[in-house]
Amino acid sequence: MKIMAVDYGDSRTGLAMSDETETLASPLETIYEHHFDRCVERVAKIAVEKKAAMIIVGDPVNMNGTRGERSEKCSEFARLLREFVDIEVIMWDERSSTNTAINYMNEINKRGKKRKQVLDQAAAAVILDSYLEYRKRQSGNK
């Protein structure tokens, strides 16, 4: 099934999508939207258009495992998203996803304006890849 991941941000929200086989997590799009409700609506519309069967919303849990203001805002994003779509929406721990995406971009030497345009998509792909790995491990344990 196709799974979409969301890396929510106040001004930029990155999206990534898996293939049908849940093997590959690919950057999809960056939404430039400052208005919370409009961002949720755009994500919902894209999820339906892309035929996502599940949506993963990154949960920026603090490194010590506590939930801060950003985590609460992402939880609210997921809650509101559930009102717009008839698709399962789950929260997924995204600790260090942006740092992982930055390290990857350093490795491929993507810098400047181009980097900023795709960083949030790359972070969403990191979140999704982590979730896909988890699903593989879970299906292997059955």
Image: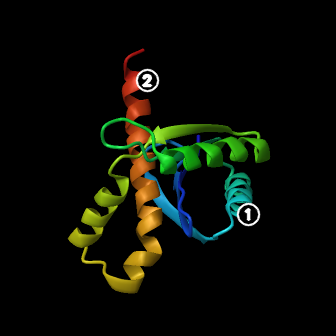
Can you identify the residue that label 1 sits on?
38
Tell me where residue 23 appears, x and y as whole percent.
43, 44
Number of numbered tags placed on the structure image: 2
- Mark earlier in primary sequence (1, 2): 1
In front of the other: label 1 or label 2? 1
- Mark 1, other Cα within 10 Å: few <14 / some 14–19 / many ≥20: few
Q: Secondary structure at mark 1?
A: helix
Q: Amino acid at mark 2?
A: Ser
Q: Amino acid at mark 1?
A: Arg
Q: Residue at x 41, y 62 (%)?
A: 122
Residue 139, quarter of the rendered image = top left
Quadrant of the snapshot with the N terminus: top right
- Compared with 94, 50 (above or below) is below
Q: Residue furthest bottom?
A: 113
User: In the rendered view, how is the structure colored?
Assistant: rainbow
Q: Nearer the viewer, residue 80 or 138?
A: 80
Which corner quadrant of the image does residue 98 belong to?
Answer: bottom left
What residue is shown at x 37% (from left), y 43% (from top)?
62
**Residue 112, how many percent across, how many down?**
34, 84
The disc placed on residue 139 is 2
Position of residue 43 relative to residue 11, above or below, is: above
For image coordinates 24% across by 77% down, the residue present is: 109
Query: From the viewer's perspective, is residue 76 above or below residue 134?
Result: below
| Crowding near the residue tagged with mark 2, few <14, some 14–19, many ≥20 C-alpha atoms within 10 Å | few
Disc 1 versus disc 2: distance between alpha carbons?
Answer: 36 Å
Q: Quadrant of the C terminus?
A: top left
**What secondary structure is found at the residue carrying circle 2?**
helix
Residue 86 location, x and y as percent?
76, 39
State left or right for residue 99 relative to residue 35: left
